[in-house]
Image: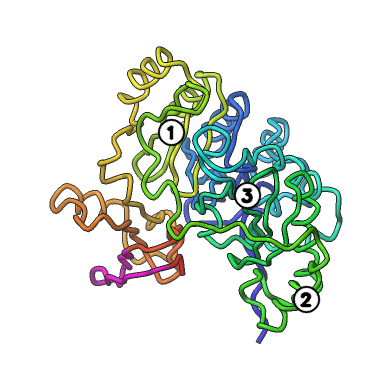
């Protein structure tokens, strides 16, 4: 039986939900420039439900778009420079180590990110990659490769990286400058092996071995020696000193959602905003005086800079009435739970969902509360599925 078509949404091909169309905006490495964020906030206010949601792949999405407004919304996103063309819209799935180039790490991975996007856009065949196929840049701290993107490069040191496939090291080391070409070559090997598989870990062992054989001549043999526990091993929420002496602020919001007003205020700071796969909002490259002002202004607007807040490790899918498949008003139920019982004290992430599809589940260990129509079933998960 063949797998159904990949329905992962993008900007041009949206998902028709109960509350309107959902558009997903892919950010290379989770980074969005101030002008683009301001434009997205305006588009969300005009065409969507007025909010911008953060995803577990460090992307953004807008809900509540009317069918007739999908095209005008896409035009606005195109004009903002957040997408380049319709054909390659959904293949730009790129995640970067959260603090790379600013706090710790073996290398600044950002220098190669634009090159990967250029390589992806240069080839016609990349259009056939699933919207779920994922590329990663890990600066050696293990925070990206532990999420098992399909193709990841992990910093070895000395401007070299090791290629990993679905989280497994290949033993092939290439210069960081050559990483984009090597990553796309690995994706091409997957494309040649796949039938209806969306991701590398869905291939048979023979298929995965064929990909490894197809890149065996790249670079030299070597290893990145990934740490057993990723760093940071906790939330990037609060005040962090960068390597250059400036300040990076990390925050979360309720339900990982920004109102258009919150987004506009964040854009007004005038620095790139970084979104993480843990649905954090990072505001980097600030002087201490500016950082203090940012906290004073944004905290009353709903930005949470406290790493002990329950919203740091509690999340939920949309639930009803926004999703027709949901068996519960998940977000209202979660709010009631937090007000009456509070979060569990085990320090584990908790994700509430309205059905077994479990949309938005975090990677790694978490507790999942699944609506059954008669309450919630509690499950323990080590991975996102």
Residue 77 location, quadrant: top right
Q: Secondary structure at mark 1?
A: strand
N-term-proximal mark, 2 vs 3: 3
Q: Is residue 247 left or right of residue 76?
A: left
- Between 353 and 279, the one nearer to me in the picture: 279
**Of discs 2 and 1, which sits in the foreground?**
2
Which disc is residue 259 wearing? 1
**Of discs 1 and 3, which sits in the foreground?**
3
Compared with residue 26, is residue 348 higher up or lower down, i.e. above or below? Answer: below
Tell me if mark 3 has few (under 14), some (14-19) or many (20+) residues whose alpha carbon lies within 10 angstroms of its own: many
- The residue to which callout 3 is attached is 155
Q: Secondary structure at mark 2?
A: helix
Q: Is residue 163 left or right of residue 354?
A: right
Looking at the rendering, in which quadrant would you find the N terminus?
A: bottom right
Q: Secondary structure at mark 3?
A: strand
Name the residue at the left extreme: 340
Magenta segment boundaries in residue numbering: 367-382
Provide residue 279's location: percent of width, then percent of height: 44, 45
The residue positioned 80% from the left and 44% from the top of the image is 118
Q: CA distance from mark 2 to mark 1?
A: 43 Å
Which disc is residue 193 wearing? 2
Residue 182 location, quadrant: bottom right
- Between 360 and 16, the one nearer to me in the picture: 360
Coloring scheme used: rainbow
């Amino acid at each position: 039986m063949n797998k159904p078509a990949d329905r992962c949404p993008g900007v041009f091909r949206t998902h028709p939900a109960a509350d309107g169309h959902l558009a997903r905006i892919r950010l290379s490495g989770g980074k969005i420039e101030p002008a683009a964020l301001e434009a997205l906030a305006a588009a969300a206010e005009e065409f969507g439900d007025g909010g911008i949601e953060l995803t577990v792949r460090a992307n953004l999405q807008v809900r509540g778009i009317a069918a007739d407004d999908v095209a005008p919304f896409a035009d606005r996103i195109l004009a903002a420079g957040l997408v380049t063309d319709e054909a390659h819209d959904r293949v730009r799935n790129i995640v970067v180590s959260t603090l790379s180039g600013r706090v710790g790490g073996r290398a600044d991975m950002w220098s190669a990110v634009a090159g990967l996007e250029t390589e992806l856009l240069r080839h016609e065949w990349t259009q056939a990659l699933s919207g779920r196929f994922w590329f990663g840049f890990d600066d050696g701290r293990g925070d990206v490769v532990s999420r098992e993107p399909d193709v990841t490069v992990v910093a070895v040191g000395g401007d070299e990286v090791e290629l990993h496939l679905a989280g497994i090291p290949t033993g092939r080391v290439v210069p960081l400058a050559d990483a984009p070409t090597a990553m796309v070559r690995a994706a091409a090997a997957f494309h040649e092996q796949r039938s209806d598989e969306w991701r590398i870990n869905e291939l048979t062992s023979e298929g995965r071995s064929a990909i490894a054989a197809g890149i065996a001549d790249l670079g030299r043999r070597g290893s990145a020696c990934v740490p057993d526990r990723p760093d940071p091993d906790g939330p990037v929420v609060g005040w962090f000193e960068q390597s250059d002496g400036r300040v990076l602020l990390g925050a979360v919001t309720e339900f990982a959602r920004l109102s258009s007003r919150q987004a506009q205020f964040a854009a007004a700071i005038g620095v790139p905003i970084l979104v993480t796969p843990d649905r954090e909002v990072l505001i980097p490259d600030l002087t201490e005086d500016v950082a203090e002002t940012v906290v004073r202004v944004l905290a009353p607007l709903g930005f949470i800079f406290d790493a002990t807040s329950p919203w740091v490790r509690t999340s939920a899918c949309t639930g009803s009435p926004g999703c027709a498949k949901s068996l519960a008003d998940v977000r209202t139920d979660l709010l009631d739970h937090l007000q009456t019982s509070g979060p569990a004290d085990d320090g584990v992430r908790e994700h509430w969902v309205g059905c077994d599809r479990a949309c938005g589940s975090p990677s790694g260990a978490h507790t999942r509360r699944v609506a059954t129509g008669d309450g919630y079933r509690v499950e323990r998960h080590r991975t996102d599925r």
